[in-house]
Amino acid sequence: MADENSKTNLPPLSLHVPEPKYRPGDAVDYSDVEIPKAGDQPRPDVNSEPASMRDMVYDMVRVLDEDYKAVGPWDPKLSDDTLLKMLKTMAQVRAFDDRLHRMQRQGKTSFYMKSTGEEATSVAAAMALHSDDMCFPSYRQQGILFVRGYPMVDMINQIFSNREDKLKGRQLPIMYCSRRLGFFSISGNLATQYPQAVGWAMASAAKGDTRIAATWCGEGSTAEGDFHSAMTFATVYNAPIIMNVVNNQWAISSFSGFAGGERTTFAARAAGYGIAGLRVDGNDPLAVYAATQWAAERARTNNGPTLIEHFTYRAEAHSTSDDPSAYRSAQEREEWPLGDPITRLKRHLIHRGVWSKEQHEALDKECIEAVKVATKEAEKNGILGHGLHQPFETMFQDVFEEMPWHLEEQSKQANKEREIKWPDAEASK
Amino acid sequence: MTTMNMIEAINSGLDNMMARDDDVVIMGEDVGYFGGVFRATAGLQEKHGKTRCFDTPISECGIIGVAVGMAAYGMRPVPEIQFADYIYPGLDQLVSEAARLRYRSAAEFTSAITVRSPFGGGIFGGQTHSQSPESMFTHVCGLKTVIPSTPYDAKGLLISAIEDNDPVMFFEPKRIYNGPFTGYYDKPVEPWSKFEASEVPEDYYKIPLGKANIVREGEAVTVLAYGTMVHVANAVVEEHGIDAEVIDLRTLVPLDIETIEASVKKTGRCLIIHEATRTSGFGAELSALVQERCFYHLEAPIERVTGFDTPYPHSLEWAYFPGPVRIGEALEKIVGELTS
């Protein structure tokens, strides 16, 4: 036995528990965060073997340089119109988030989640996909819906759980769903969409379809078994899928170290599975677009799955139920070395000579006004908790395709209770 | 004695056990520095150290599996699953592993773990923050299931659960963390400090597992409830002026069948209330037991009042919740049933 001679004098083991560098009040210094120079990253052919491009998982695809110029082989060379659409969409998402967050604070709904600072990871990514590619989002990818033209009024109806809510008031606010727009029903449980997206992609391949799938999760959720099952199935079946990990550094109060971020990158998860992996500056909309475009082409040409880590920062709270000032330094947001995706794209467009500060100010006003109008419209359909917006029988529908006897009974019971509990609502029915 | 709400009482129970026993460790999502999304572990990392109360990766399978392994070493882990709705990735580790380890190893290895998890609705949490999955666990042989209804009980039961050498599911009714709930969502919450059950000793004490609590004595009907529904049941009984005996089960497995049996034999009627969905809910088990043991004493059919067999809806939460109207109706029906 190995221990026969060596039992004595062994040092005691110690348990490592990760700790983030900065807590509330701490001065933040990100000089140790390695930010590769924009334009320096090679762009492999889309049919490259994953093993031949392993360096990509530790590098960072970046297109916009310090002067807001688009540089290097990853520059997607988009038209002014496309870039302006990207900018406007991101600005609209941010204005929407700000207002709906405030509406929750005013008691008009129960819950909200902003995507502030991470808009590029959904807006630019969705723009690089075909409009009929299937998305399996997590809960912070509202940007996809804006790209695909989902009406803001419908989003707000869902947030208010009101009588025009297409999900019949069943889901927590922001847990959208739109089959028409290739946007899968959002679950409150984490990473469950990952293997589902792989399954959709496998089905598309099995059927000889041309559509691919894309999915998103946070870096924290990569700890779930679903993530690893998805990676295994994706590599085994060479599924036509893009798996996005939005590394926004924080999972509620747990920093990325609790998902393994102290030891390696999240893109590096790909290497272990033999999947192509890219690590991308998630606050650089051009880099996000280029990486997604690359992965989409790879998937569409039967070259298999790609894992993309978007390195970004959750600028705001996890949700309206969270207060990040209790666990992280407020300076982190200010010092974040990759800046803000909207500001960076704005400056790039100004640099190109197709945009101006004045135009941007006007855009912000337009976006605010558009949300205001949509909110007013949605409010006409009711807000959460004020009035009974859905007929009670809707609660029992869609549990099964056909309603079994016991749900019929319970539905009658609910309606009977309604007459007793809310007689006024009955009268006005 | 100190006044505590249920969160503070649970925190105090954890704190006491960590101070008494170095093997007690707490792990879960956001439980460390932040102190938990409901603040149940606030201050424990600072007081007892980072290796005694620590954050985990977001992997319920990992959290439970690692807890089983730490227990195999001889420690006494108290993992937290942030919402009961998130527990399902950990089911294999609970059902196939923790619950059966003692049996399959002929007691060479045991799983002295206590899985804490907030459960139940009434906070506009939608289908992924409102579930009551307790009967999934009572159906698993080898797991104990505990559900407190007051701060005082929460601490005493939690300490017993942690000291227990078998795996315990400890479900905390989050709707009553800050104050009891009578079923009227539109009335302001009354804080626990207004109620006697918020008087909690700061020191160690235990409430034994498997012992129910008769919270209201009566002759007309036995009402079986646990967690939030104990308070709703009490309020409805008062409102209807019915001389009901309300029993807070406190532990579902092992169940205090003696207390239930004695009460139903006395009253001859039994109403069972839970917030969980109806079909295969714990009420079905209770109903069968009462029928088996008290059939010749029953003067009316046993009634169940439960949540509906649908996912927990967001906007129609108060239509879903088994509140005063549904309970009142069942109470009147069962008490009105003529003795044959």
Image (tube, rainbow, N blue to C red):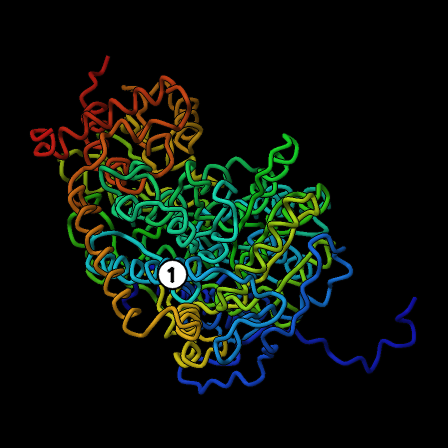
Quadrant position of residue A119: bottom left
Residue sticking out furthest to the top: B340
**Relative side of A321 to A302, left or right:** left
The answer to whether residue A237 is seen in the rendering is yes
The vertical placement of A194 against A320, above or below, is above
Q: Residues within 10 Å of mark 1 (few under 14, many from 20)?
A: many
Q: Quadrant of the C terminus of chain B?
A: top left
Q: Label 1, on which residue?
A: A90
Tell which of A216 and A90 is nearer to you.
A90
- Residue type of the residue flagged with mark 1: Met
Residue at point 64%, 32% (across, down): A208
The vertical placement of B29 against A66, above or below, is above
Residue at point 35%, 42% (across, down): A171
Location of residue A401 in the rendering, given as x and y in whole percent from the top left corner: 41, 22
**Relative side of A341 to A59, left or right:** left
**Relative side of A239 to A99, left or right:** right
Residue at point 40%, 68% (across, down): A342
Query: Label 1 marks which chain's residue?
Result: A
Q: Quadrant of the N terminus of chain B?
A: bottom left
Location of residue B326 in the rendering, given as x and y in whole percent from the top left corner: 23, 31
Quadrant position of residue A366: bottom left
